[in-house]
Image (tube, helix red, strand yellow):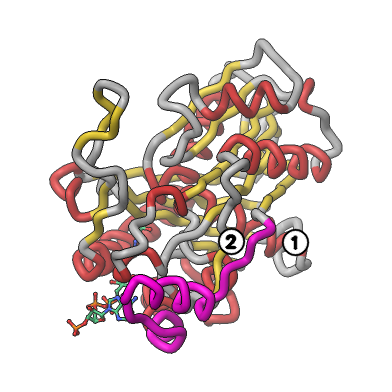
Amino acid sequence: MTHSSAARFSRIAGTGSCLPSNRVTNDQLVARLAQHGIETSDAWIQERTGIRSRHFADSHMGTADLGAEAARQALAAASLSAQDIDLIVVATSTPDMVFPSTACLIQQRLGVHGCAAFDVQAVCSGFVYAMTVADAMIRAGNVTRALVIGAEVFSRLLDFSDRTTCVLFGDGAGAVVLELASQPGILASELHADGRYADILCVPGHVEGGRVVGGGTIKMDGPAVFKLAVNVLENGVRAVLGKAGRVEADIDWLIPHQANIRIMQGLAKKLSLSLDKLIVTVDQHGNVSAASIPLALDHAVRSGRVRRGDTLLLEGVGGGFTWGAVLVDY
Ligand code: UT7
């Protein structure tokens, strides 16, 4: 397909990521929980989730620190500087402050000012939501270069007396630079939410009078989330393929939200995709919510698996309940 010189699309110009240095293995977590009389095992965690280790940020490190470092790497990969950026969108559920947004804090760390900056809150689907918003703003002519960042310190939301959630999540950040292009990089996207399921995965509290009221840690009905995720993802993926006029066989790499290896493999199977086409980082990173997809993308790019010209399907699912997918010609 050729497009006129006036056609506006966006493409991924560079990727980056950042993990805190503190890597915590399943066995280390097992030992930590055992001190509080909570029983779990490396075997259970690996078998049910595929997770072997995750990274936890130290107390001095925040979401904006991780996001800014991922952004610097993405800018370097795109041979750009922060001055070239006119939009920063950050997907996070673990902002450093109630306000201002983490995007503003990252802008400050990058040493620039003036460009638009805001956060998107769609929990584990946040990165596909943020990509879709930035792509739309580029295509609408509002901006020409955007940093799209997923950054989280989920460890701060964990209840280490709840073994059904605390073994699942980790911290980190990933970023892409999206820039104006005459040919489509972002081919299509598809976003959904169903607030009727808000309470199956939530941090129910709010800040009131200087305190968190109602609970400041993750509550999740794991099996309910699992079932819903498997049901909604297939439809979302088929819809985004249909919008772009592509079929399953066109996907070179499936880069899903990294929550559970069984959900990811189940989706690949439904799409008749070989497991060789599935990018998996959940084993090393755990579930990093909005940062999972850009972390997996950056690792796949830097390891040489994802190459220019490949077609990538990014999909996310999580709290809200939210889900979505973005199809990309990289
Ligand atoms: O990022 C947003 C999206 N989030 C997700 O996609 C999460 C989706 N859900 C899941 O990934 C899975 O449901 C979990 C990994 C959370 C749980 O796996 P499951 O196979 O659904 O296990 P289950 O909740 O049905 O629990 C099975 C058993 C239970 O024991 P009983 O009742 O059979 O005796 C749990 O108490 O496993 C027990 N269990 C554990 N045992 C050892 C739960 N957590 C643990 C644990 N260690 N950490």
Specify whether 85 is left or right of 172: right
- Using the image, determine if residue 284 lies above or below residue 130: below
Q: Residue furthest front?
A: 35
Magenta residue check for 80:
no
Can the viewer see residue 155? yes
Q: Nearer the viewer, residue 103 or 269?
A: 103
Residue interval drawn in magenta = 21-47
Q: Is residue 22 magenta?
A: yes
Question: Whole-percent x and y of residue 3?
Answer: 66, 35
| Residue nearer the viewer, 4 or 39 | 39
Q: What residue type is labelled 1?
A: Arg
Depth check, mark 2 against mark 1: the one in front is 2
Asked which secondary structure carries label 1, the reply is loop
Could you say where residue 324 lies in the image, as x and y percent from the top left? 38, 49
Residue nearest the observer in this picture, 193 or 247: 193
The label shown at residue 307 is 1
169 shown above or below 83: below
Asked if one can make out residue 267 in the rendered structure from this viewpoint, the answer is no
In the rendered image, the vertical position of residue 320 relative to residue 241, given as above or below: above
Residue 154 position within the rendered picture, expressed as x and y whole percent measured from the top left: 45, 51
Could you say which disc has been placed on residue 118 in the image?
A: none
For the point 64% across and 43% down, the residue is: 66
- Label 2 – label 1 distance at C-alpha: 27 Å
Q: How crowded is mark 1: few (under 14 residues within 10 Å), some or many (20 or more)?
A: few
Looking at this view, name the residue that lies furthest to the top: 114
Label 2: which secondary element: strand
The residue at 62%/48% (across/down) is: 174
Q: In which quarter of the image is residue 239?
A: bottom left
Q: In which quarter of the image is ligand 1?
A: bottom left
The residue under label 2 is 55
